[in-house]
Image (cartoon, rainbow, N blue to C red):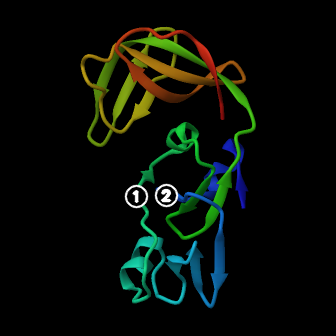
Amino acid sequence: MIVTYRDVLRVTFPVFKLPSDNLEFTDGLLTLDGKIVDDKNMEGKTLGARRLQTYMKPLHPLRLAVLDLTGIIKQRERYFIDSKGIPFIYEKTRSCKLSYYRIKKVERKETASLLWLHGVRAPIKIPRPPFTEYRWAGILHLNKFPWLLYEFSEVKLKDSNRKV
């Protein structure tokens, strides 16, 4: 399955990087270069639950969990598997402008924080407040509108383009 920024909602996060697309599905086992990635013969709705139950060895290590679209965009690799065990290729199809805005304030809420930026009307919901030394936030723009938080910075960086 090929996924782009437009249909990333089909993916269940977290996703895990795979080093290649040498995947093979045989008898309910998804293997990568001879190592087990997922055992569909086991009960469980998630990849992690099935990996914990399987007795098949060796398991392919899943070292890096990517938690959101920004994390996928920042990866050089294109091959991933989502937490339901569906492998996919992320294809970067569009170039977006990355602009930096000064952080106005951060409102702490119970389960998240709201990030207010100079020049952006609506706040951006973030899982945790940034470190106090970060004064700038890099925002990706889609169709000239602020779309996605890309990174935080201590100094204002030069505006650029990113392929998403």
Q: Is residue 102 above or below residue 113?
A: above
Q: Nearer the viewer, residue 78 or 86?
A: 78
Q: Residues within 10 Å of mark 2 (few under 14, many from 20)?
A: many
Mark 2 vs mark 1: in front: 1
* The C terminus lies in quadrant: top right
What residue do we see at 72% from left, 23% from top? 143
In screen coordinates, is 133 left or right of 67?
A: left
Q: Is residue 136 above or below residue 14?
A: above
Q: Amino acid at mark 2?
A: Phe
Q: On residue 24, which mark appears?
A: none
Q: Is residue 6 above or below residue 100?
A: below
Q: Amino acid at mark 1?
A: Arg
Q: Are marks 2 and 1 in contact (CB under 8 Å)?
A: yes
Q: On residue 16, which mark appears?
A: 2
Q: Nearer the viewer, residue 117 or 1?
A: 1
Horizontal and vertical percent position of residue 152: 40, 23
Give the labeled residue for mark 1.
63
Q: Secondary structure at mark 2?
A: strand
What residue do we see at 38% from left, 14% from top? 103
Q: Residues within 10 Å of mark 1 (few under 14, many from 20)?
A: few
Horizontal and vertical percent position of residue 93: 75, 38
* The N terminus lies in quadrant: bottom right
Mark 2 and mark 1: Cα distance apart in space: 7 Å
In which quarter of the view is residue 89 placed? Answer: bottom right
